[in-house]
Image: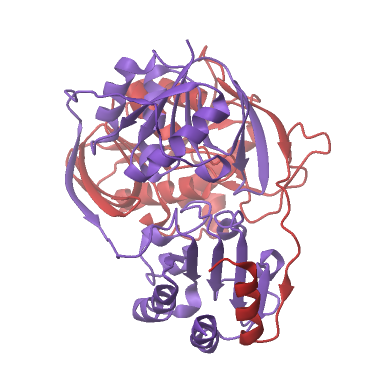
Amino acid sequence: MSKLLFIAFYESDLSAAPGFAKALGIDYDTFLAPSVPSDVFAKELAKIATGYSYIASPSSMKSKDALPYLAGLLDTPMVTDVISVVSPTTFKRPIYAGSMIATVETIGNPVVITFRPNGFEKGLPVSASTVTLEFTEASNVKVVSESNRGTGRPDLGSAKIVVSGGRPLKEAATFESVIGGFADSLGAAVGATRAAVDSGIAPNELQVGQTGKVVVPDLYIAAGISGSTQHMAGIKDSKVIVAINTDANAPIFEMADLGLVGDLYTVLPELQTELKS
Amino acid sequence: MQMKVMVPIKRVVDPYAKVRPLADGSAVDTTGAKFEINPFDEIAVEEAVRLKEKGIATEIVVVSIGKSESEEQLRKALAIGADRAILLETDMVTDSSVIAECLKQIVSTEQPALILMGKQATDDDANQAGQMLAAKLGWPIATFAAKVEVNGTNVSVTRETDTGEQVVELVTPAIITTDLRLNEPRYVALPGIIKARSKPLIRQAVTTESSSKVNMTHVELPPSRPVGRKVGNVAELAAAIKERGVL
């Protein structure tokens, strides 16, 4: 029997389950993961994992923390960031910051997978049964504290509109008022470049790119972003990319659908007015 | 108190270089490419060296698994401040599970108290080896570290999460995978690299029986985006955005 165990680390992950199961062409069970350290999670899951041919979850820092641990315990193949299913043992995934797409073959079961949901159909799970597990294993990691910087803004990963800023914003307060303010006027999520995060202008969870979050909005507005390969890796599946930059030769203009050479400090307020009119 | 730190590093194509598939799509074309230490691993080396400078780490062993040329990256790690290097020489391209097996083999002889390694390599972007090694060793792990504080056998790690930060405590022996904000690796000047040539580097054969469970069979370029256009002013930009129906 071939079956998928779909793991949701977040409630919002659930909508990706039916589409991914359909791509594999099999039935699935869902499991809503509790907030526990990755070693405990993996040890408990390992007890039921061999009853499945696939164990998959949408890509997130949580799934990328816990699922490789599970694959290590099971000594089973793992494929990160799957974007399409070619056959039951063949998958496509981005490599080199998305500048190439690799096709990989897996040997053995269960195959552990994290995948990018945007490549698959979305919909709410209907017929799937829910797995419950009692967590009895002790962790050898002690969680001391946790901070969730909830902003009240839409989630980056699922937002329809994302507005991102780069290092030209210079300081956190400016970033928040200029990028955050403009984003709020559109009901958009806020993103940032690695450079902006590294220099303390924006918090780390807003980083978009190869090593940050991958976003797939209908509209991505990049303000003061030059467009490094690392950043573009996180945005290139957006429907419409808009670039605003003072440097007419910035690489972002090569990938943007709409570009405007100009100063974001004057462009954004004007654009806000124009878009509302 | 003795604290040996092991830092596995990977030789990768310069992450800022443009790379393409070979014409037949069988592999990535690395002809003429410049190679570097995987940037996340370099952050791990830097963190280990800082621990040694603070008098916490007593010895730093860097390890690489790969082609003979990986010596170049091991030498650079020695120049940053590692004490000695081990090269597990193989021409095979392996998946993360084999890398974890190889590292486990070295751990059994080296017995480090702490393993610091990059959260992912910038070539295959897999983000697996550290977690798999932790599973195989049964050691505690903290991934995506933004801050590391060692206090005897206790290690406090601030981790980056999807929504903010988490602070965890581990008891050594333990594994930490590094994220970008942990530190900024130092620049190593030429004299340092020359001096590092006298530090010990040994070559060993891979002895693990395990083989890759994930094999790359084809590489291609992603579909390219349609060519965009520049607009002349804000009004034009607003009109074009509205026209696309994406608001």
Indicate the colour of chain B: red
The answer to whether residue B90 shows anywhere in this view is yes
Q: Colour of chain A?
A: purple
User: In the image, residue A126 lies at what x, y percent?
Assistant: 39, 31
Q: Nearer the viewer, residue A252 or B12?
A: A252
Q: Position of residue B229 (x, y in %)?
A: 74, 73
> What residue occupies the far front of the structure in this picture?
A126
Q: Left or right: B5 with respect to B239?
A: left
Looking at this view, is A264 or A37 the one in front? A264
Left or right: B33 as drawn, with respect to A115: right
Q: Is residue A251 left or right of residue A44?
A: right
Q: Note whether residue B116 is visible.
A: no
Point out the image quarter for the N terminus of chain B: top left
Q: Answer above or below: position of B5 versus A260.
A: above
Q: Residue at x 53, y 52 (%)?
A: A210
Q: Position of residue B200 (x, y in %)?
A: 49, 35
Vertical comparison of B2 with A110: above or below: below
Rendered location of residue B52, percent (x, y)? 31, 48
